[in-house]
Amino acid sequence: MPIIYFNFISYQKRSLRFIKMKSVFSFIYVFFICLFLNAQSFENLTFGSEDTFEVMTWNLENFPKNSTTTINYVTQIVEALDIDLIAIQEISDEASFQQLVSNLPDYYGYLESTYYDGLALLYKSDATRINNIYRIFNTTAYWNAFPRAPMVIDLTYNSQQIYIINNHLKCCGDGVLNLSNSNDEETRRYEAMNLLKTYIDTNLPNENVIVVGDLNDVLTDAESNNVFQNVLDDATNYLFSDFDIAQGSSADWSYPSWPSHLDHILITNELFYAFNLSSSKIQVIKIDESLSGGWDEYDENVSDHRPVALKLTINSNLGLQHTVTNSLRFTSYPNPASSNMVFNFNPSQTNTHIQIVDIMGHLVYSKNLTNGQSKVVFNVESLSNGIYVAKLSSANNTATIKVVVSR
């Protein structure tokens, strides 16, 4: 089994390991897997498409959880989903990961280390070009916040550069954020999220960034205990694409055993426009529903986490709808809001209007502004809790803001 080593210029201290297996034996191997594991039926398990970029986060719980049986299950699941890039957590055995990649002739695999972190990557080489992979916050000063140093994947898809940051944050806790205790689990996750935000704000301020992983906490905690609060408060620049899932039925959450929704996909504002297109999709992939044994079979043979996947149309228009010109400035307060939200902007000219749409693109508010008007007060009490996008348009200029309704 050949293993290819490749050193990136900016990451010289240790070599990055790419695993690529492609032979007729792989096809034969997968064929016999499908014959013998006839209790599985993945015909309806689909997600990827040729015209979109898909990223998925998946905690594979001490992979392989059930030896070769797990490898066989995951092989079929990955092939059925046909996703461009899969960020994985908890790979425990390098040889097993090699076997998984050898079963997937359309995918490359990357695993830096099974020691402690277990962060890994599967990606389709025909659609995605990896420019670089490197770790951040991997020195001893950050071990408390990041027991597993985040993995940054710099890639190009359809001529657009995208940064994926794969994470597995500290687990457990009592649900109470105790900032006076540096060993408090919630405090460690809170610090990790703030460090990630600062890193993006400082190093990738105008880039397409997607933060994924088992973040080991829920998005819907009260503000005083919410480890994501500083990110949620910066609604102009950040959006948890799975926020509506977190607010929805527990049947759709990524960690049914608790139940809770712990696996998330966060995007920066450069991707808001793509996310609001009708072609986009965010989903917890309920693989267990494709198994005859349901959740028990999935939990025994695959993982205790369901994967979360995001689909986006990535093209030359990416980010253009979020350009704020000098002639059009747009702010909102408070955000999140529970009653009234105030939109402030420079005095409007002829044909200026404001619109608010929900996450599915449905119009919930529209108002034409009078000349010289610089403020709109909008009552959100009639809206359901969730994420909306406000758009201010004037002539050829457009500015957008994410609006969060929370009570």
Image: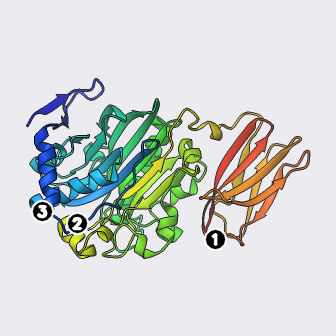
Q: Provide the secondary structure element on which disc 1 rests.
A: loop
Q: Are marks 3 and 1 in contact (CB under 8 Å)?
A: no
Q: Nearer the viewer, residue 152 or 99?
A: 99
Q: Can the viewer see residue 64 in this picture?
A: no
Task: Please state which of the two labelled residues, at mark 3 or mark 1, is closer to the viewer.
Answer: 3
Q: Give me the disc on residue 40.
A: 2
Amino acid identity at mark 3: Phe
Disc 2: CA contacts within 10 A as few (<14), some (14-19) or many (>=20): some
Crowding at mark 1 (Cα within 10 Å: few <14, some 14-19, many 20+): few
In terms of secondary structure, where does tag 2 sit? loop
Q: Which residue is mark 3?
A: 36
Left or right of residue 361: residue 124: left
Image-quadrant location for residue 67: bottom left
The quarter holding residue 296 reads: bottom left
Against 334, is 266 above or below? above
Considering the image in quadrants, where does the N terminus appear?
A: top left
**CA distance for labels 1 and 2:** 39 Å
Q: Position of residue 115 (x, y in %)?
A: 15, 49
Which of these two is toward me, 133 or 64? 64
Q: Mark on residue 384?
A: 1
Count residues near mark 3 (Cα–Cα under 10 Å), then give few for <14, some for 14-19, many for 20+.
Answer: few
Q: Measure how far apart labels 3 and 1 are at the Cα level.
A: 48 Å
